[in-house]
Image (cartoon, rainbow, N blue to C red):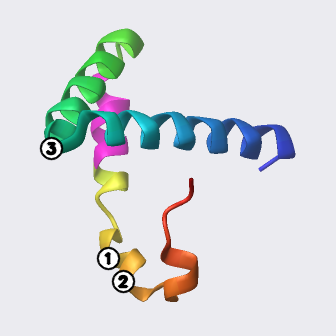
Amino acid sequence: MTPSTVAKMESAYDTLAQAIDQAGPRSEVFLVKLALLMVHEWGDAEAFERLVALAGQDLDVADKVPDKLAEPRR
């Protein structure tokens, strides 16, 4: 990834993290709404399904990261 791409990813991560925090106990509803809005905006259900499958892989990776690295960014 280029430095520009990394910066954009970090910005997107920060935006998403803040929105999840603001949603509080309704964060799952927020994420579902966001996903549906994104697939509607992109108009590519096949790509969406592929990305959902990809995102579902290795969800336990945070359990394998040393505590110092696993702390949420703020």
First to last magenta residue range: 45-52
> Quick check: 64 left or right of 30?
right
Q: Residue at x 49, y 63 (%)?
A: 72
**Residue drawn where x is 25% and y is 34% of the image:** 23
Q: Are marks 1 and 2 in contact (CB under 8 Å)?
A: yes
Q: What is the x, y in percent for residue 66? A: 52, 89
Q: Which residue is mark 2?
A: 63
Question: Looking at the picture, which amino acid does disc 3 mark?
Answer: Pro
Looking at the picture, tell me which residue is in the foreground, 31 or 47.
31
Instruction: Specify the label residue 69 is tagged with.
Output: none
**Cα separation between marks 2 and 3:** 22 Å
- In the rendering, at what x and y percent does residue 74 appear? 56, 53
Q: What secondary structure is marked by label 3?
A: helix
Which of discs 3 and 1 lies nearer the camera? The answer is 3
- Residue sitting at x 57%, y 35%: 12
Q: How many marks overall? A: 3
Secondary structure mostly seen in magenta is helix
Could you tell me residue 73's position as x and y percent? 56, 58
42, above or below 47, in the image: above
For marks 3 and 1, the one nearer the N-term is 3
Judge by depth and name the residue closer to the eye, 44 or 24: 24
User: Residue 63 falls in which quadrant of the image?
Assistant: bottom left
Instruction: Inspect the image, locate mark 2, and give the three-letter code of the amino acid beneath it.
Output: Asp
Discs 2, 3 touching: Cβ within 8 Å: no
Kind of residue sitting beneath label 1: Asp
Does residue 65 appear to the left or right of 32 in the view shown? right
The numbered disc on residue 25 is 3
- Looking at the image, is mark 2 or mark 3 nearer the viewer? 3
Image quadrant where residue 69 sits: bottom right
> Is 22 inside the magenta-drawn segment?
no
Q: Which residue in the protein does label 1 denote?
A: 60
